[in-house]
Image: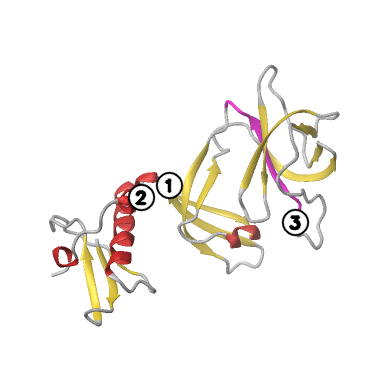
Amino acid sequence: MQFVYADPDSETSETITLPLDDSATKLKKFEIAGIRNFEQAWYRANREYAKLRGQRITLETTTTLDARSQLPNARIDVVDNTRFKAFDGEVVGQSGLELTLSQDVELTPSAAHSIVLMKRDGSLQSIACTAGSAPNKVVLASLPAEAIVTSYGADGIRTIFSFAVDSARGAMAYLVQELDITDGQYVTLRAINYSADYYTADTAAVPAKASVIN
């Protein structure tokens, strides 16, 4: 890959090519505004190179407008509920720790269950829960970190939930790449699989500039 940045020392555009041994044959070019020194460019170039090597899954999903608060390269957790039985909907009522849901849910005997609640910024909170007083009600083990919205109004849409047995649910971490906010009601979010390896070079020493840029 090639990473182009504006170098204040040479007062021109400089290019970092990775891998350094020039073994790559098809180079993808990156040019990100705002990076104006070699150290910043080196760290960012290594992140982009690591993502190119580690990217295995691409995700595109439509979300509510809360996703507008997300930024490129932010980590998000996404549950693929197409692979197991999940119950999704909105919270339509609350009485203390008991929530009334927009649809009935099914509990598996002798199994642990959780309900995932979406916060206003699009992040998620998972809370253990048990059966409530009706098929469409659950009792939370603790209050959520953010107040639940049960009606449309000044606070926006109702709180969105996803309910399932814990043994079936598994969230996968993704890294946001693009947000499409042209639709007035929904946001299209594109992401790739997240890996801590993307940031391995952040703690490594920066090589001499002359050894990288000729």
Residue 76 is left or right of residue 7, and the answer is: right
> Are the residues at dot 3 and dot 1 in contact (C-beta closer than 8 Å)?
no
Residue 119: x %, y % from top left:
67, 51
Residue bounds of the magenta highlight: 158-167
**Rendered view: 123 above or below 137:** below
User: Which label was assigned to residue 198?
Assistant: 2
Residue found at the far top of this picture: 110
Residue 143: x %, y % from top left:
75, 39
Mark 3 vs mark 2, CA separation in Å? 35 Å
**Rendered view: 70 above or below 145:** below
The residue at the point 29 percent across, 49 percent down is 53
- Any magenta on residue 164? yes
Please state which of residues 142 and 176 is positioned toward the viewer in this rendering.
Answer: 142
> Are the residues at dot 1 and dot 2 in contact (C-beta closer than 8 Å)?
yes
Mark 1, other Cα within 10 Å: few <14 / some 14–19 / many ≥20: many
Return the residue at label 1: 194
The residue at the point 39 percent across, 45 percent down is 196
**Rendered view: 132 above or below 4:** above
Sooner in the amino-acid sequence: mark 3 or mark 1: 3
Three-letter code for the amino acid on which mark 2 is drawn: Tyr
